[in-house]
Amino acid sequence: MQKKKCFHSWEMINVASGLIVVKKCFHCGKVSTCFTFHNEAPVETCHEGAHFWNFMEGHESFRFDLRCSKCSMVIKLDELVGLMRCTGCDPDCDVCILKEKIEPEAGPVYIACGRRPVDERKQLPKKKIASLQKFFDQRCESMECKIKVVPHEMVRNVAKCYAEPVKDVDMLFSAVPEGG
């Protein structure tokens, strides 16, 4: 007997608040990002391999996983540090260039922030970004809006990026202008 293919209908589960923490290594200059479930930023310097991380900033945010309401499949989004709304701050950034091409028709562009340094951390796979996009497409269908999700590797220069952290679930769709 052949198994039926599920046309997934994603919902958020395991929603937890915390902080997106940004640190910089004073030894090599690389930037590190991670999510912490604490409400207070870890400001102490820490040592990890060849890195000496100094706290730079912390942004209130949340993390979550996705579950299909039809087949109960769960997608763990452990690599996702948080979502950031592109503000169009750097005209040379690939995310800003995309944002200019598709707005206002497509609505806001959310950056799926992963862990940095990119070359040293496991990143959010394309399949998981596609599932995130499908989740937003499903939610926006009833609201007649659109949201585009892109990987954080598209951000050309993290130091120039002033994307707005999405602080809670309610903020995800409140930033969507009426009618798109």
Image (cartoon, helix red, strand yellow):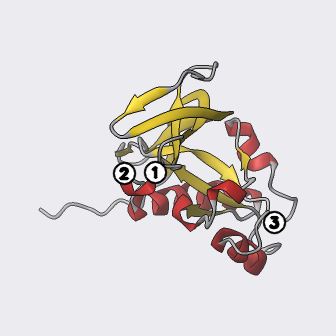
Horizontal side of residue 177 vs 1, given as left or right: right
Kind of residue at disc 2: Glu
Query: How many other residues sit within 10 Å of disc 1, few (<14), some (14-19) or many (≥20)?
Result: some
Q: Which residue position holds label 2?
A: 120
Residue positioned most to the left: 1
Tell me the number on the disc at residue 180: 3
Q: Nearer the viewer, residue 31 or 87?
A: 31
Rendered location of residue 130, percent (x, y): 47, 63
The answer to which of marks 2 and 3 sits earlier in the sequence is 2
Q: Is residue 48 above or below residue 71?
A: above
**Mark 3 belongs to which amino acid?**
Gly
Marks 2 and 3, Cα distance to the nearest angstrom? Answer: 37 Å
Foreground disc of the pair 1, 3? 1
Q: Are marks 1 and 2 in contact (CB under 8 Å)?
A: yes
Q: Residues within 10 Å of mark 2 (few under 14, many from 20)?
A: few
Q: Earlier in the sequence, mark 1 or mark 3?
A: 1
User: How many numbered badges does the structure rendering display?
Assistant: 3
Q: Position of residue 134 (x, y in %)?
A: 53, 61
Q: What separation in Å lies between label 1 and label 2 (alpha carbons)?
A: 5 Å
Callout 1 amino acid: Pro
CB under 8 Å between discs 1 and 3: no
Q: Position of residue 39 (x, y in %)?
A: 63, 20
Residue annotated with mark 1: 117
Q: Quadrant of residue 123?
A: bottom left
